[in-house]
């Protein structure tokens, strides 16, 4: 998942809120020092008589001048009131050379009531302490400039200031204005209490200025500065810097002795915005260093994030969010706790919308400083901002990473798929590109890992294991793409394919009828996916099953694009075929067919399944007592055929056709003769080659044939075994386990007849025979031996002696041999019946 640092820098907005709040607080606190001293001076006017011009009064403490008051004219009125004109006050710092100035056109003081009034304008010039002078606005001077430049001065203008001694409050209802370099502030009305050292800005608080070459703007409904506890409180503050905005119902700023912000909090409907991004929370806490740079921030209470950027809409949520920052204000760690989640959308070729998401009880993001691209002017960043790149993501507790992908399987149109990775613990690591982008490098999941993929047509695949390791590499477009993925420990898999039944004369899936889902499952010790080859390799007790068919092996490799597969080591396929039945009918199960080999190969497009072994340990196909074994068994699902071959010139293909017998109609008998019980048959065949077709239900053995079993011992050049027609099987599912199920099956069904050709030699108990062709029919246990001059069929019977004729008909259980004469003699066929004496 591509990660954008811009989506996480909104926490710096909190710094902007507190920073601008500090500007107002520092200015107000500086004015507090001047106002308090000014009020104290009014108490010393009692000794002035009548009118005095150019009045000057100084006070010293421990040999250091603390203040000097000068008035162009002072008038004492008879009622105990005084008027001062053209007033100028100098306030001296106890520990430095800083001097503050206060100017007023006229001041009236009533000694009886203890009320002092400044008539008209009041102006103050307050020097900023050197400890904070270099950090308060964007015109910060170089370190060497402190000696050669004039002190930085805060200018304060107001009017109609009233001091009430009994209340210990100095107040004005007029506007108060502050200016400091490129920073300014104003408020509608102010109150100052020397007793508890508090300054209250009554309404319409507004501060503006330049910080780090960006415009700052702050408003509040009111403000309260408590110098004793170094706390500044704001009502409904809103702060803006660049494209960032922060606001809340209230905010509290905790100040250091030098007036800089130590930490602060905002409560109630906290909103932080940056461009199209908006973060909401119930509460915000933040800590700043002595340079007013954000060190940490905490958002509490239903934290949500929404970015309406049309190119990449994003949403996120958590109960709490903690962020830590380095000395430059760049984030180092951000932690979301309590059902943490982030989701985004991104456009893709073809007008598609791609979704990305991450969930977890806790999500931790780690960042590294990007010195190369710092201050590169990223959108929404300060010109001097520090750049950060995501280094890692860590989701804990019901963790999930999900997203969409577009895949184009061989011969198919591109398909949008939904992917998800679940685990108890998910860790993603990132690398930095030359362009300064973070690129996903690895993804590690531990504990109950799950990979889930769902296609647009409802196809679903899923795998579960103890551990997941995935590696990513840059793609041609610069985005991260999967290189390898490995799941280990108790790996299980599930695949559900939704197919529509084929319409008559059309390809599968072309019907508009209801879809038929098929489910296959699998398991292994571990599985590895390699994107370059698009292959999934499963190792260790690999098992596939579609509910009726199964495949086991030590190792299986599946080619995801083509659907081809290879199996190696102790391969065993089990096929449980069912007769196809009309909808609603119960399918009749047939005996299970097994195929065992050393290795196997499946080609999906050609419906090819090849099972390989050696002549010493051949591949074997069997069902019940029937079987075929050879070094190579090649199934062709298109032709519905099986080819069996040995590995070497001296090797053989061996087959066994067995049936348990049963009750059936005697072939060729009249209905009145009824039914009889047929005997069980077993026929063993060995030859260099076997070719079987499911269409004709014939197994052709060639290259020299040897037969044993119910037929006795038969040798010939060629043999054809015909099987009884089987009932049509139900469609198989999709996957390696089903590849064998879709193939021809010469052991599925009973033997109908066997015909052997070419130099036939037959041996049965008490009987031998030769001929050109021998036909055995299993249903009536009948043999027909034929030949042609000069090689007429010939039987040597232990009791009857030699028997020769054009056609010899007999059976194992019967007591007669039917002999037909030479076809060329007059009268046609000659039928001879020979009685065979039975021994008792």
Image: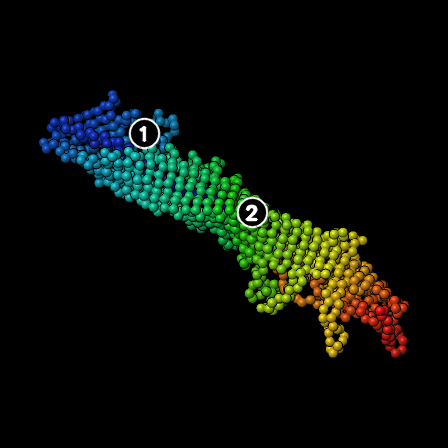
SS at mark 1?
loop
Distance Cα–Cα, label 2 vs label 1: 62 Å
SS at mark 2?
strand
Q: Residues within 10 Å of mark 2 (few under 14, many from 20)?
A: some
- Taking depth in this image into account, of 408 and 681 the one nearest to the observer is 681
- Taking depth in this image into account, of 804 and 358 the one nearest to the observer is 804
To which quarter of the image does residue 446 belong? top right
Up/down of 734 relative to 80, above or below: below
Farthest-out residue, left: 78
Q: Is residue 799 left or right of residue 477?
A: right
Q: Quadrant of the C terminus?
A: bottom right
Earlier in the chain: of badge 2 and badge 1, it is 1
Residue shown at 89%/76% (left/top)? Answer: 825
The residue identified by callout 1 is 129
Residue 671: where, in percent of width, then height?
73, 77
- Taking depth in this image into account, of 147 and 6 the one nearest to the observer is 6
Up/down of 306 relative to 644, above or below: above
Residue shown at 89%/74% (left/top)? Answer: 824
Residue 449: where, in percent of width, then height?
54, 48
Q: Residues within 10 Å of mark 1 (few under 14, many from 20)?
A: some
Up/down of 578 relative to 290, above or below: below
Residue 95: where, in percent of width, then height?
30, 25
Up/down of 240 relative to 590, above or below: above
The residue identified by callout 2 is 466
Residue shown at 78%/52% (left/top)? Answer: 648
Residue 150: where, in percent of width, then height?
32, 28
């Amino acid at each position: 998942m591509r990660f954008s640092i811009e989506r996480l820098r909104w926490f710096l907005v909190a710094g902007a809120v507190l920073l601008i709040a500090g500007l107002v607080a520092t200015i107000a606190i500086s004015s507090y020092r001047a106002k308090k001293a000014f009020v104290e001076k009014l108490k010393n006017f009692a000794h002035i008589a009548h009118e005095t011009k150019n009045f000057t009064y100084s006070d010293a403490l421990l040999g250091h001048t603390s203040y000097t008051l000068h008035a162009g004219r002072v008038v004492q009125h008879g009622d105990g009131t005084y008027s001062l004109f053209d007033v100028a006050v100098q306030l001296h710092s106890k520990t430095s050379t800083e001097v503050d100035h206060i100017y007023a056109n006229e001041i009236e003081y009533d000694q009886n009531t203890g009320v002092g009034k400044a008539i008209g304008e009041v102006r103050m010039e307050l020097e900023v302490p050197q400890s904070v002078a270099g950090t308060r606005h964007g015109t910060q001077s170089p370190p060497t400039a402190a000696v050669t430049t004039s002190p930085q001065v805060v200018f304060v203008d107001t009017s109609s200031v009233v001091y009430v001694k009994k209340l210990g409050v100095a107040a004005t209802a007029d506007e108060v204005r502050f200016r400091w370099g490129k920073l300014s502030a104003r408020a509608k009305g102010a109150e100052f209490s020397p007793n508890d050292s508090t300054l209250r800005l009554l309404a319409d608080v507004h501060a503006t200025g330049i910080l780090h070459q960006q415009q700052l703007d702050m408003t509040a409904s009111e403000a309260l500065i408590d110098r004793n506890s170094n706390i500044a409180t704001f009502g409904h503050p809103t702060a803006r810097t660049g494209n960032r905005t922060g606001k809340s119902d209230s905010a509290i700023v905790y100040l250091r002795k030098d007036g800089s912000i130590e930490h602060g909090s905002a409560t109630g409907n906290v909103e932080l915005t940056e461009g199209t991004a908006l973060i909401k929370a119930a509460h915000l806490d933040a800590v700043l260093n002595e340079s007013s740079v954000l060190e940490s921030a905490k958002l509490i209470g239903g934290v949500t994030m929404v970015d309406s950027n049309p190119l990449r809409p994003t949403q996120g949520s958590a109960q709490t969010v903690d962020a830590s920052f380095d000395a430059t204000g760049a984030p180092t760690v951000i932690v979301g706790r309590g059902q943490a989640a982030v989701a985004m959308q991104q456009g893709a070729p073809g007008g598609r919308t791609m979704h990305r998401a991450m969930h977890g009880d806790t999500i931790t993001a780690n960042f590294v400083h990007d010195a190369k691209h710092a201050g590169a002017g990223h959108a929404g960043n300060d010109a001097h901002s520090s750049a950060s790149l995501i280094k890692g993501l860590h989701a804990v507790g019901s963790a999930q990473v999900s997203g969409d992908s577009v895949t184009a399987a061989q011969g198919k149109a591109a398909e949008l798929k939904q992917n998800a990775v679940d685990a108890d613990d998910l860790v993603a690591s990132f690398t930095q590109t030359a362009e300064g982008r973070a690129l996903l490098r690895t993804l590690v999941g531990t504990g109950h890992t799950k990979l889930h993929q769902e296609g647009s047509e409802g196809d679903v695949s899923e795998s579960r294991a103890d551990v997941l390791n995935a590696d990513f590499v840059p793609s041609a477009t610069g985005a991260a793409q999967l290189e390898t993925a490995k799941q280990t420990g108790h790996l299980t898999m599930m695949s559900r394919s939704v197919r529509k039944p084929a319409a008559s004369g059309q390809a599968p899936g072309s019907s508009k009828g209801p879809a038929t889902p098929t489910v296959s499952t699998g398991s292994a010790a571990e599985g590895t996916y390699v994107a370059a080859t698009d292959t999934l390799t499963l190792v260790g007790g690999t098992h596939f099953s579609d509910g009726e068919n199964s495949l086991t092996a030590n190792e299986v490799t599946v080619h995801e694009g083509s659907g081809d597969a290879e199996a190696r080591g102790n391969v065993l396929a089990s096929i449980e075929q069912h007769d196809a039945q009309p909808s609603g009918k119960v399918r009749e199960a047939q005996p299970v067919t097994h195929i065992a080999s050393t290795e196997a190969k499946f080609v999906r497009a050609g419906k090819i399944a090849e099972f390989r072994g050696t002549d010493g340990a051949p591949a074997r196909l069997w069902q019940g007592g029937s079987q075929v074994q050879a070094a190579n068994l090649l199934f062709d699902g298109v032709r519905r055929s099986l080819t069996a071959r040995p590995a070497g010139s001296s090797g053989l293909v061996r087959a066994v056709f067995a049936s348990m017998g049963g009750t059936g109609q005697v072939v060729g008998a009249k209905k009145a003769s009824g039914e009889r019980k047929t005997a069980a048959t077993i026929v063993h065949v060995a030859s260099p080659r076997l070719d079987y077709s499911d269409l004709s239900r014939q197994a052709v053995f060639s290259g020299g044939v040897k037969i044993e079993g119910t037929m006795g011992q038969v040798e010939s050049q060629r043999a054809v075994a015909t099987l009884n027609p089987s009932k049509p099987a139900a469609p198989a599912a999709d996957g390696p386990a089903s590849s064998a199920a879709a193939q021809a099956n010469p052991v599925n069904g009973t033997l109908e007849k066997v015909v052997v050709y070419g130099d036939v030699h037959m041996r049965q108990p008490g009987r031998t025979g030769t001929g050109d062709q021998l036909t055995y029919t299993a249903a009536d246990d009948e043999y027909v031996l034929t030949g042609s001059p000069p090689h007429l069929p010939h039987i040597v019977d232990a009791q009857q002696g030699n028997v020769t004729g054009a056609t010899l008909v007999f059976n194992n259980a019967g007591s007669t041999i039917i002999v037909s004469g030479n076809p060329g003699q007059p009268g046609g066929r000659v039928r001879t019946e020979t009685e065979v004496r039975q021994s008792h």
